[in-house]
Amino acid sequence: MAPLVPKASLLPGMVPDEQHLHLWQQSIAPMLDSKPVDPLAAQAHLPVMHQYHLGRYLFIDCEFTGQHFRRDTAMMARHDDADHLTLQLFVKGGNKVQNGTSCFQQKPGNVYGVNLGYEVQAQSEDSEVLVLVLPRQLLLDEVPILADLRGAAFAPESVCGELFRDHMLSLRRLLPQAGMNNIPALTDSLLGLLDALMAKGDSNASVAQGAMFSSVCHFIDQHLDDADLGVEAICARFRCSRATLYRLFKPQGGVREHIQRRRLMACFKAITSAKHLHRRIFDIALDYGFISPSHFSNLFRHHFGMTPSEARDVGRDRRGPMPDLSMPSGCSAAEDAERMWHWSKSLTTSAALRTSE
C-alpha cells in the first residue's frame, strides 16, 4: 500500500493550550504574521490546521478565530523564498484585505488570490478556510496568468468559480486518504483546471484580467532584449488568443506599441547610466532590437523630447542616483509546526528542481 500524502497537523490537546497558538503562528510565519483580534477568544477556540505537501504546492485546511494578518517589506525581505500566491476559499467567515495596492473583501463561496509577492494587511472574522499555496515559479511555468493575481479569481457566482470551489472542497475530502502515488494526478488536474478556467473562462472577471495584464507586462520587461519577443511569443507563453491579447492592450495603443515604448525606456536607462557610458549609443539600441540608427533616433526624440546624445549628456552631468523609470505527522505538535514552516520555505526549491528535470 502506497504511503499517504505527507501531512502535518495542529489540533487542540496536542500541547498545552498556552503553547498551541504560538505554534500555529510559527507554522505560518514565513508567509504571514498573525495576531488574534481577541486573545481571550483565540485561547478559548484554538486554531485547527491540517497541511498537505503535494510536491509542488501545499493544501491547507484550517479554522481560526478573528486574526490580524500582516506581511510587510521587512518580512518580505526575510522570507523572499515564500513569495507564493495563495488561493483561498472561505467556507465560513471572511477577511478584509489590502494586498499591495489592491483592496478586497473575501466572502464565503468565491476563490481569492492573496499574493505574497506584495505587502499584506488583513483582518479576518472567525473563519474556516481552504488554501492552496502555489510557488511563483510553478505559476510562471504552468499558469502565468495568475502570477500577479490579487483579489477575486473568478466573477461572482460564475460557473468557473463554482467549478474551482468544488475542486477545492473535493481536495479537502480526498487528501486524508490519498496516497503519494496520487500526487501526479492531483497536480495535473489542479493545474489543468486552473489553466482552462483562467484562459477560457470569465472574460468579465476584471481582477483576473488585470492580473493577466500585469503578468504580461512583467514578461515583456524581462524579455526586451529577446529578438523573438512579440505577439506570437506572448500568446504561446500565456496560452491566450491574439484577440485576448489585443483586447488587453487596446487602452495602451496596442501590444507592439507597448513593447516599443518599453524598449525605448530600457534604452534611455542604459544610455544615461554610468555602467554603459563607455558603449556606443547604437550598440545599446541594437541590444533592444532597433536596427536603423536614424529610425531609432527619431523614435527616441519623439518619445523623450531629446536625442539619444542629449540624453547621454544629461546622464554625465547628473548628480546623485537616477530615479527609477519604470513526511508524515503525529510525532509532536512542535515538530509539525516546524515542518509546516519548512514546507512553505522550501516550495521554491521544489519547483526549481521540477523545472530542471
Image (spheres, rainbow, N blue to C red):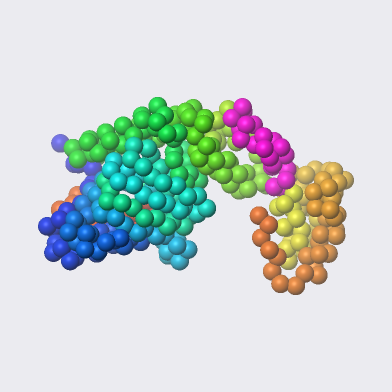
Most foreground residue, 115 or 93 = 93
Q: Give residue 294's quadrant in the image.
A: top right
**x and y percentages locating residue 114 in the rendered image:** 42, 48
Q: Residue at x 18, y 37 (%)?
A: 177
Most foreground residue, 54 or 72 = 72
The majority secondary structure of the magenta stretch comes to helix
Q: How many numbered markers are drawn?
A: 0
Residue at the left extreme? Answer: 13
Q: Give the range drawn in magenta.
A: 242-263
Q: Does the magenta stretch include residue 248?
A: yes
- The image shows residue 64, relative to residue 238, as above or below, that is below
In the drawing, does residue 337 fall left or right of residue 260? left
Residue at the bottom extreme? Answer: 319
Which quadrant: the C terminus? top left
Q: Which residue is drawn at 85% across and 55% down?
A: 306
Q: Give residue 308's quadrant in the image.
A: bottom right
Which quadrant: the N terminus? top left
In the drawing, does residue 28 fall left or right of residue 331? right
